[in-house]
Image (cartoon, rainbow, N blue to C red):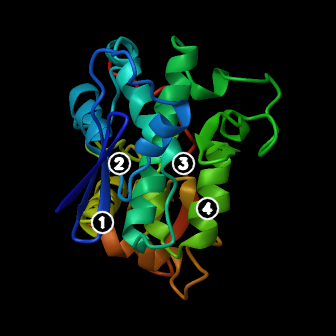
Amino acid sequence: MNHYTKKGIVLTLTGGVLFILLAFCAPQAGNNVSIAEIEAASSVDKVSHDIWDGLAKKYINDKGLVDYKGLKKDVKTLDSYLAMLGKNPPKNSWSQDEKIAYWINAYNANTVKLVLDYYPIKSIKDIGSSIQIPFVTTPWAKKFIKIGNETMSLDNIEHGTLRKDFNEKRIHFALVCAAMSCPRLRNEAYTPEKLDAQLNDQGNDFLNNPAKNKIDPKKSQLSKYFDWYKGDWKDDDKSVVSWVNRYSKTKISKDTDISFLGYNWALNEQK
């Protein structure tokens, strides 16, 4: 293990990986640190989602409902997590699971931040223009997320990154748009080590929740997700039926009469 020190920045080299620690205490004469050095020191090889994990455990219950009032008082902690994500976009060297976990957490945490910026509201759809044109004037089209040198929207993360770059349909069970009909907002961070199990758990929860999907062998009412993203459920030779049966305790068939539930856009807030 080798250490290098420059103006209060401790660089630790171990196993060929560079870890950068800030060692700033009270300001001292002759120890001026530039903004560029501080920003460089905040760039890491691997990101930790521990901050979001702690916030989720504290302010999101087992049903996926958020204590927005409480979290608003702790918004600086959320801001610190989002700033860290912004300074550390995924690298080519990351595994696919590392990238997917990063983008899901970025989407969900930034959705919560967007709600907090306008809270109190009754629905995320109260944000922005009264006339909402998809991909243009909706809350999801608002560019407010700083990732690296790019300013992104929630649409950019979901449609321009996750759906475009990864063949992982289970993201639809994980991305949460702050509405009651969305899948459960998980009260822990997604991590690459647990990602497969977490996504499967989300699928089980979503398909077996009668408020989100009403499954019956003869006549089923499915979430609008299966209508909105119908191309996603079919482009890998798997049908909507097979995706439902993958997780639902009640099985359906190609002969099942399928319709879609109305979408409840009420805020996913603890009452």
Secondary element at tag 1 = strand
Q: Which mark is residue 161?
A: 4
Q: Which residue is mark 1?
A: 17
Question: In percent of the image, x 78 and y 44: which residue is there?
Answer: 134
Q: Out of 43 and 81, give the one closest to the viewer.
A: 43
Q: Which mark is residue 261?
A: 3
- In primary-sequence order, the first of circles 4 and 2 is 4
Instruction: Compute the Cα span from label 4 to label 2.
Output: 30 Å
User: Which marked residue is nearer to the observer: mark 1 or mark 4?
Assistant: 1
Query: In the rendered view, does 254 fall on the left or right side of 6?
Result: right
Secondary element at tag 2 = loop
Marks 4 and 3 in Cβ contact (< 8 Å): no
Residue 70 horizontal/vertical position (percent): 32, 14
Q: Which residue is mark 2?
A: 210
Question: In percent of the image, x 58 and y 43: which residue is there?
Answer: 262
- In primary-sequence order, the first of circles 1 and 4 is 1
Query: In the rendered view, does 203 fall on the left or right side of 237?
Result: left
- In primary-sequence order, the first of circles 4 and 3 is 4
Question: In percent of the image, x 61 and y 40: which residue is there?
Answer: 146
